[in-house]
Image: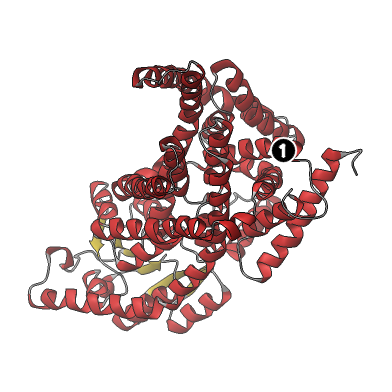
Amino acid sequence: MHDAPLIATLVSGIVLAFVFASIAYKLRLPPLAGYLMAGVVVGPFTPGYVADGHLAHELAEVGVVLLMFGVGLHFSLKDLLSVKGIAIPGALGQMAVATVLGMLLGWGLGWPMAQSFVFGLALSVASTVVLLRAMEERRLMETERGRIAVGWLIVEDLAMVLALVLLPAIGLALSSGGQNGSSLSFAAIAGTVGITIGKVALFVALMLIVGKRLIPWILKVVAHTGSRELFRLAVLAIALGVAFGVAGLFGVSFELGAFFAGMMMGESKLAQRATEETLPLRDAFAVLFFVSIGMLFNYHVVLTEPLVVLAALSIIVIGKSLAAFAIVLAFGRPLRTALTIATSLAQIGEFSFILIGVGVAQNLVSKGAQDVLLAAAILSILLNPLLFKLLDRARPWLDAREALQQEQALAPALVEPAADMATSTLTGHVVVAGYGRVGRLVGESLHERGDAVLVLEEEKEKIEMLREHGIEAIVGNAAQDDVLEAANLAHARALVVTVPDAFESGEVVRLARLANPKLQIIARADSDAGMAHLLQKGADLVVLAEPELARGMLEHLLARESGSVPRIH
């Protein structure tokens, strides 16, 4: 085993990661917790076999590059702009609060200002892996809460990318000042940072001008060869080549190069295929990255500095979450949204590890501070699923609270109806309940055909956009009697319910069926149970994504074989 340290490190890391991730899955914890524990087991602070720390760090560097490439590949400026009003100020405000709390903790412990700042900044950003996994498990990605959380996360990621660019420059300036034995002036730091920003600006300009056209073109040319292996190799060559190439040419970090390589590749129509082809390798190296982080964790810090670890954990779980909760409520969002965002952000992960690692490498952060952060991070990741379970248990209370608020809001409307609730004069129209991704596709297709369309949607921004495009829309929840009454269902041709929540959709279907027994009702479901529920409530047709996709593909195949013109799905 000692004759092949690279193989030993790879095998021990992946095998133990699988074992502990399986245990974490059984305990309904994020796999990330299992990966970190695997690193603790093969690390230098536990008895038994110790993996090669230097090789683990080298492998982790590749993992970081691929993680950042994945972040860039999934970066969506459109998604961010849709919730920019709350995501940008909210994320920056929450990060500022958490950073200040971290700095106050450092000040109380007598840490240097630079160490306190880096430590606080590392506490302020949530884990992309943990947050997205929690959102996907609860099918919140297409809801307003999910979009705000993802937009919030994008802002945090961009702030961390900027921090990773500037931190080495600041560290270099501080170390140079220390070597000269003189106090470092603000002008010296500003000069070093300014040069770094200039190099980054040059790199970004080059990527936006050349990379934005060159990278998608390369993917297109390779895709036309029909070789899956060559396409996969091209994606990896671009990701790793850009990351390491720009680090040498422009002096920027590997992370920034990988992030922009992913961003530019995301401009290609083949971005989804690139994501699928590289996902296994990205996951494998990401696992090794987290294992290497676990190897750095000295569990003795929990025994020797329990109060410090508890204070850092409190900043993550309580301080940061309360800041996010207050900010979301201040922007007039519902209590459920505020609780979801606060719970989602009550943990830290990969960017925190990367940032604190850079801080240690630049001699800005001590090993003891890194141990405290790693301990708090692991505990926050273990606690986060429990917080989501508490939120799930609060759902009946939140539902009842929102129902009461809706009744109170509707009471004045019964006396003096609002302009938006005036009954539509459309006849023979199609009513689309919900204007998410599915609703938008249905509504736009019908409108382009010249059909009369009426959309029911709660978000006022979408309502304004619809009206600008000449599509009639009503603000409100489609599950409310007055909203459906305003849609003039008695004279409608059909109702298409695209709301992802089956129980909410069921209420829309039930009320619509009472309003017009002859109305054609088509609904969406994400499971067999949801499909049965909607049919029982009165839907004529319930569409499940997977069976409909298979049916469309089969019809296309049969149509081609029979010589008829294939249908487009």
Comparing 208 with 519, the one in front is: 208
Tell me which residue sits at (17%, 67%) in the image. Answer: 421
Residue 134, position as x, y percentages in the image? 52, 61
Comparing 215 with 171, the one in front is: 171
Q: Is residue 561 left or right of residue 215?
A: right
Residue 178, position as x, y percentages in the image? 48, 22
- The residue carrying mark 1 is 59
Mark 1 Cα within 10 Å, few/some/many (few <14, many 20+)? some
The amino acid pointed to by label 1 is: Leu
Q: Visible in this render: residue 359?
A: yes
Q: Visible in this render: residue 555?
A: no
| Residue at far left of view | 416
The kind of secondary structure element at disc 1 is helix
Tell me which residue sits at (32%, 83%) in the image. Answer: 514
Residue 376, position as x, y percentages in the image? 53, 56
Location of residue 335 by image quarter: bottom left
Give the quarter of the figure containing the N terminus: top right
